[in-house]
Image (tube, rainbow, N blue to C red):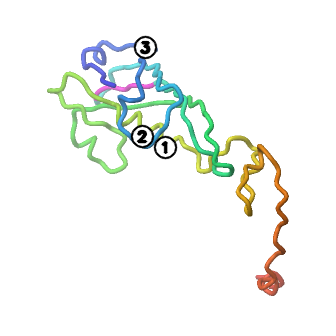
Amino acid sequence: MKLLRSELETGFKEKLFDINASDLPDRGIRFFDHHIACTLTSSVVQFGYQVSGCLQAAVQYDCDRCLDCFDNHLDLPLKLWFTARQELSKNQGSEMILFPDEGDCIDISCELADLIILARPMKSLCSDECKGLCSLCGINLNRASCDCIPTPEDDRWEALKELKLD
């Protein structure tokens, strides 16, 4: 997705950008409908430009318990700063994106893809009640039950359970 310098200089408020997911760099993200909506507002600031708003997308994750694919709707806040001053953009930990004065537009596709991939939860679950897979036969316990008999607990570690740390 490209933002024109002329639009950034005049500013815009709550402008809707429709993006096709295939226009983003591949980060291994699966999209439900390949449609991403960004509602953005821009303003001129002392060091360059600020763009803020929200990004909405429907992504697909694999459940970590049952391995089923499920859809998740993302509604992510977005705030970007652009500057032509190299010293501001090169500082470690800086959130500034270099936008040289010679450029007519800036592509923020990488930043959007990064934002989406960073929104992935540490543990993706299709639901809080997900039962997962049977550890013996592998059947999805959300869809069916199995007749597997759990193996007795390994008692080699019982002595360690008795230890208390002070």
| Bounds of the magenta segment | 48-52
Q: Earlier in the sequence, mark 2 or mark 3?
A: 3
Q: Position of residue 83 (x, y in %)?
A: 27, 32
Calculate the distance from the C-alpha at mark 3 to the C-alpha at mark 1. Answer: 24 Å
Q: Is any part of residue 166 visible from this angle?
A: no
Q: Earlier in the sequence, mark 3 or mark 1?
A: 3
Q: Which residue is mark 2?
A: 114
Q: Is residue 136 above or below residue 52?
A: below
Q: Which residue is mark 1?
A: 118
Horizontal side of 31 relative to 50 (left or right) equals right
Horizontal side of 45 relative to 155 (left or right) equals left
Label 2, secondary structure: give it. helix
Q: Nearer the viewer, mark 2 or mark 3?
A: 2
Q: Position of residue 1 (x, y in %)?
A: 34, 25
Q: Nearer the viewer, residue 154 or 86?
A: 154
Q: Which residue is mark 3?
A: 15
CB under 8 Å between discs 1 and 2: yes
Q: Is residue 23 above or below residue 120?
A: above
Residue at 54% over, 29% down: 32
Residue type marked 2: Asp
Q: Position of residue 36 (x, y in %)?
A: 47, 24
Label 1, secondary structure: give it. helix
Q: Is any part of residue 16 visible from this angle?
A: yes
Q: Residues within 10 Å of mark 2 (few under 14, many from 20)?
A: few
